[in-house]
Amino acid sequence: MDELYQQAVDLHRRHHGKLAVVSKVPLADRRDLSLAYTPGVAEVCRAIAADKGQSHDLTLRHNTIAVVSDGSAILGLGNLGPEAALPVMEGKALLFKEFAGVDAFPLCLATQDTEEIIETVKRLAPTFGGINLEDISAPRCFEIERRLRTELSIPVMHDDQHGTAVVVLAGLINALKLKDLKKEDARIAVNGAGAAGTAIVKILLAYGFRDLVVCDSKGAISKKRADLNDEKIELANITNEAGVEGGLAEVVANRDIFIGVSKAGVLSASMVRSMREKPVIFAMANPVPEIMPEEAKAAGAYIVATGRSDFPNQVNNVLAFPGIFRGALDRRIGQFTEMMFIKAAENIADHIADPTPDYIIPDPFDREVAPKVADAIR
C-alpha cells in the first residue's frame, strides 16, 4: 500500500494534477478569432441577455457542473482544508468525464461557514448546469444542500449522501431477490448517522423498507434520547418504531441486514452470528471496513459488500453520480427528486440479469451503467 501511495504522489507531481482546459473550436486565423471572440461573440451575448435560458445552449453551461467542497470531510481523512481537497475534486471531475462525458470543474472554497458557502455557490451558479457538493461535513452538508436546492434553478446534489444511497439501494434490491425476502419484512440496522447514513435511511424508507434502526457512536437513535441534534431527531421520528435501545450489539441482533457507514472493526463475528439466517452485510467504512469480508463470511454472512475494489460487491459512487448528472444536463431538469434516485437505483440493479451473492452490484468500470442511470433522471 505504501508503494501505491508513493506512485499516486509521483503521478500527480509529474502531471501537475489531473485536469486541463481544452478548446472545442479552432483558432487558426482571423475569421476563427472573429467567430469565437470579438466581434462575433457580441451577438451571442445579446441572445443570452434576451433569454438567459440560452446560456445552456450557447455556452459550456450545457455540459458543465461544479464540484464544490470546503475540505471538511475528505474521504476517510477528515478536515484537511480546501487545498488538500483539490486532488479529490480533480479526481471526481475526471470520473465525470470518463464515465459520462460531463465536463466538471473543481471548486475548493476557503471557508467552512454554511452561509458563506451557500452565497458563494449561488454567485457562481450562472456558469454551470449543475452543482455536485462533495466532502462537506455533517450536519452542515444537509442545510447547504437543502438551501441551494430551494434557491437555485439548476440541480444540486451532495454525492456523499445520494450517490452512496443510490448504490446501496441497488445492491439491496438484488440482495432481496437472492434471499427471497420482501422489503416490507426486512429488518435493517444502519451504523452511522452522518451524511451517507442519513441519505441511505431516507431512500430505503421511500423505497418501501419499514423496519430500520440507526446507531451512532452512542447507540440506537430513538425518541427517548435527549442528546440528538435536529438531523438525528428527524431520524428518530422516522425509524425505530419499536424503541430499540442499547449499542450496536443489541441493535444488530435478529436483523436481516447490516449497513455500515461508520468505523473500522465495529462489527464483530459474534454480532453477525446474532443476526437472522443468511444475513446481508454492507460494511462500507474505508479503507478498513466494519468487518472484513472473510470474517463476516466465516460467521455466516450470505452477502458481503464493502467500499473496496479488492473485494466483490464494491459500493462505488461512480456507478451513480456520472449518470445522474448526465441525465440532469441532457433533460435540463430543475431539481433532483427522491423518485429519480430510486429509479436510478432500480436501473443499476436491473443491469445485472442474474445476481449472485458475489455479484449484486455492477463493476465500477461497466460503461453501460451510466446511460441507464441517466435514463432515470426525468
Image (spheres, helix red, strand yellow):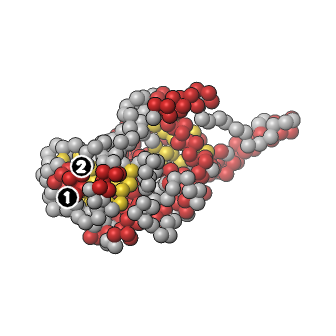
Would residue 209 be found to the left or right of residue 273 on screen? right
> Secondary structure under badge 1?
loop
The quadrant holding residue 22 is: top right
Q: What residue type is disc 2 on? A: Ser
- State the residue at coordinates (38%, 42%): 286
- State the residue at coordinates (49%, 66%): 352
- Answer few, some or many: residues within 10 Å of disc 1's Cα (few below 14, many 20 plus, some between 14 and 19): some
Percent across and percent down for residue 292 are 33, 48
Q: What residue type is disc 1 on? A: Ser
Look at mark 1 in the image and give the residue it sits on.
Answer: 274
First in sequence, mark 1 or 2: give its number. Answer: 2
Residue 40 in view = no
Look at mark 2 in the image and give the residue it sits on.
Answer: 268
Percent across and percent down for residue 180 are 34, 73
Would residue 368 be found to the left or right of residue 33 on screen? left
Residue 314 in view = yes
Percent across and percent down for residue 106 are 54, 37
State how far apart marks 1 and 2 are (Cα).
10 Å
Quarter placement of the N terminus:
top left
Of residue 376 and residue 175, the one placed in the foreground of this image is 175
Of residue 146 and residue 346, the one placed in the foreground of this image is 346
